[in-house]
Image (cartoon, rainbow, N blue to C red):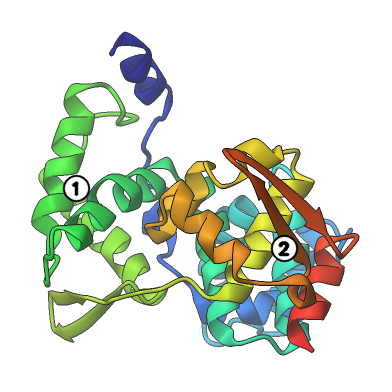
Amino acid sequence: MTVTMNKDMQRQYTTAISKGAGMIEETRRLLEHWIPGESLDEFTRRVQDEGLLGNATAYRTRDIVRRVFAHRYLRPTDKPARILQRVLSSGLPGRVFTELLFVFTARRDPLVYDFTVREYWPAVRRGRNVLDTDPMLSFLSEAHYDGRLDNQWSESVSVRIARCVLGLLRDVGFLREVTRGRREIVDYRMSDEGAAVLAKELNESGVTDSSLCAHPDWGLFGLAPSEALEKLDGLGEHRGVIVQRAGSVVHFTWTVNSIEEMIDVLAR
């Protein structure tokens, strides 16, 4: 119990999500023009000069590029941006891009990550049909008492953050807004292509075969380790990976040498 609490207290929740929820179209537009290796100052200046974000003010443009795009996809390395850029140019279905964008966003925002895994998917499994701000506000209240909030949040800030998190879940397809403020839970199933790319990304990040399907990231899509394993087992050699099982031992044989090659194979 003590170990869990200490681990939770290390995960500080911030208001970063207030700078932008999914921002899927904005991210897509930025990735279409982003050049790997380009300095952030130069990229920001180019986004402003070329009006890549439409009518956004100079201040808002800098905010989106620096505090959303760079924070989520360029730090600590630009690998997320390179992966998303490759997926965009590959012609894979748009939902694959959105799923990976969500993974990279959630990894950089513990509030989004933990609420999705601990509250959203359990609500789905309980058969809940609608999700409003109440569960999110309760989650934030608990986080305040156990020290996970970066500081004291007012009620108005908590409501705004709750709406932003639910807006992100709507943007990635987990919720459907039927009327203002009323969001229905969608019966979402992770795509095979998204699962394949995530698995290879975890593999390249140093996750071992024995730990790969137990990685917490699968929980962002409601997948238990056994469900992640079944999903990957169903992909087949033609999609870049062969799953071999011997009792409780699992081994992955990759028929591609890199995540870029994996994306290209999936797009054929």
Give the percent coordinates (x, y) of residue 80. Answer: 70, 58
Vertical arrangement, residue 88 with respect to residue 145, above or below: below
**In the rendered image, which quarter is residue 9 located in?**
top left
Helix, strand or loop for disc 2: helix
Q: Residues within 10 Å of mark 2 (few under 14, many from 20)?
A: many
First in sequence: mark 1 or mark 2?
2
Q: Is residue 5 left or right of residue 110?
A: left
Q: Which residue is mark 1?
A: 158
Give the percent coordinates (x, y) of residue 216. Answer: 48, 43
Tag in front: 1 or 2: 2
Give the percent coordinates (x, y) of residue 266. Answer: 74, 80
Q: Residues within 10 Å of mark 1 (few under 14, many from 20)?
A: some
Q: Quadrant of the N terminus?
A: top left
Name the residue: 21% across, 37% down: 153
Q: Mark yes or no: residue 100 visible.
A: yes
Seen from this angle, which residue lies furthest front? 247
Q: Is residue 217 left or right of residue 82?
A: left
Name the residue: 27% across, 64% down: 166
Q: Is residue 193 left or right of residue 126?
A: right
Vertical arrangement, residue 87 with respect to residue 210, above or below: below
Vertical arrangement, residue 46 with respect to residue 256, above or below: below
* Numbered tag placed on residue 81 in the rendering: 2
Q: Mark yes or no: residue 154 visible.
A: no
- Between the residue at mark 1 and the residue at mark 2, the CA separation in whole angstroms equals 30 Å
Between 183 and 24, the residue placed more toward the observer is: 183
